[in-house]
Image (spheres, rainbow, N blue to C red):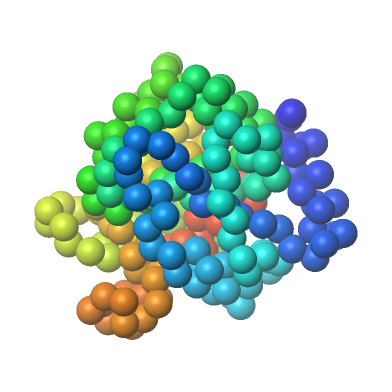
Amino acid sequence: MNRIVFLFLLFLSSQLYGQIKLAKVKYSGGGDWYANKTSLPNLINFCNSNLPLKLSTTPETVELFSKQLFNYPFIHLTGHGNILFNDAEIQNLRTYLLGGGFLHIDDNYGLDLHIRREMKKVFPALEFVELPFTHPIYHQAFDFPAGLPKIHEHDGKPSQGFGLISQGRLVCFYSFESDLGNGWEDVGTYTDPIEMHQEALKMGANIILYAFKHP
């Protein structure tokens, strides 16, 4: 399915039902794919209030081998531990991304080694590249001149935004050492100041808007 057809079908869906649905990825391997239960709902509500989008306020859960994957223009994957893709998931995810879908991976701390290994199976010829601060993903509805905001310290490393680029298109954005998902969660879940919560939501909104605006 090419991207034009993919987006046209999503447009028809939004006109018929009034909303576009996003999904969290459920994966195997032992990692907590279900982490940050309030993060996506909060991000969606923020987007609906601040962007010209109609997103369903209830994100869904999808497994990568499922045909339902193609119902979602944007999927989000997070967690702390191990992750494993089987052959069916690898093939389906590759088809989804090449056909117009977008994957956001958020390292909730401890995911890096595993997700790099598994995404290499999806795109053997591609490498994650760090996106420059001038990349459009940092300059959508909200401006981030210094790139990805730092939400949680963890190892004290700087936050980095990586991408997988296929045929000139960013198909996957990987937020590393930032922990955006924790920043999206309900205020009070962590000790982060409200300003940090807002920064995380703004960056998340940029990622979603970029996914829709940049075929």
In this view, the residue in front, 47 or 16, is: 16
Q: Position of residue 196 (x, y in %)?
A: 31, 75
Give the residue drawn at x 58%, y 31%: 65
Q: Residue furthest top?
A: 125
Q: Position of residue 74 (x, y in %)?
A: 59, 49
45 to the left or right of 123 = right
Give the residue drawn at x 50%, y 60%: 206
Q: Position of residue 4 (x, y in %)?
A: 77, 37
Give the residue drawn at x 43%, y 29%: 85
Up-down relation of residue 88 to residue 152 (above or below)? above
In this view, the residue in front, 150 or 22, is: 22
Quarter assignment of residue 31: top left
Quarter of the picture holding the C terminus: top right
Quarter of the picture holding the N terminus: top right
Q: How many marks?
A: 0
Give the residue drawn at x 12%, y 56%: 156
15 to the left or right of 178 = right
Up-down relation of residue 25 to residue 37 (above or below)? above
210 to the left or right of 130 = right
Quarter assignment of residue 151: bottom left
Q: Position of residue 200 (x, y in %)?
A: 38, 67
